[in-house]
Amino acid sequence: MPFIFEGEAEIPSTFKAVYEAPYKKVMFDESGRTILTLWNHHSLNITEEEYKKDAIYFVDLLLQYKATNLVADNRGNIFPLTSEIQRWYKESISHLIGNHKMHKWAVVLDENLLLYNLLDEVSSRAKNNPSQKNAEFRFFTNNQQALIWLNR
């Protein structure tokens, strides 16, 4: 049985799935060099170890597909971001994503302020990296808005 991901209906058919777990789907559009992530409510049930492995694998996907644009739809991400996980992410992952040469980063959120703060840390680290000085980072409330902005 396929898993349901909020916002998936908003995604153009040019995006093809490259990774899928019960809690997360990653899609790639080769023509726009864009990686898109979708989360769902199953993220509540993953362990901290699974979250860490997933974050590391996501960085690997960015490198493998040479993505220059990213849409991170985190509306369905309800994984509890403990202070320990936030610290690990800042120390282990945010600099890896920040060092990747992205042109545009679109983040789709609801009112999850903890997640906003964590993603803002990734944005700050990217902006402080000389190779990312021209990268743009914006927050959105749906995928359609994010994709329109990416394709400008």
Image (tube, rainbow, N blue to C red):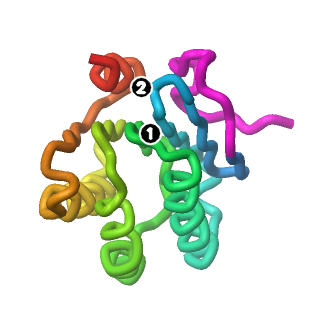
Figure quadrant of the C terminus: top left
The answer to whether 35 appears left or right of 21 in the picture is left
What amino acid type should be assigned to the residue bearing mark 1?
Answer: Asp
Magenta segment: does it hold 68? no
What amino acid type should be assigned to the residue bearing mark 2?
Answer: Asn
Residue 88 shows in the view:
yes
Taking the spot 21% from the left edge, 43% from the top edge, the residue there is 135
Magenta portion: prevailing SS class: loop
Taking the spot 40% from the left edge, 18% from the top edge, the residue there is 144
Numbered disc 1: secondary structure? strand
Q: Which residue is tagged 1?
A: 73
Label 1, label 2: how many angstroms apart (C-alpha)?
7 Å
The answer to whether 39 appears left or right of 88 in the picture is right
In the rendered structure, which disc, 1 or 2, sits on the residue that comes first in sequence?
A: 1
Q: Are marks 1 and 2 in contact (CB under 8 Å)?
A: yes
Q: Which residue is tagged 2?
A: 143
Crowd rating for badge 2 (residues with CA inside 10 Å; few <14, some 14–19, many 20+): many
Q: Disc number at residue 43? A: none
Magenta segment: does it hold 3? yes
Query: Front-most of 135 and 41?
Result: 135
The stretch in magenta equals 1-18
Q: What x and y, as percent, mark residue 11?
A: 54, 21
Position of 144 relative to 39 (above/below): above
Crowd rating for badge 1 (residues with CA inside 10 Å; few <14, some 14–19, many 20+): many
Position of 52 relative to 128 (above/below): below
Indicate the quadrant where residue 123 lies. bottom left
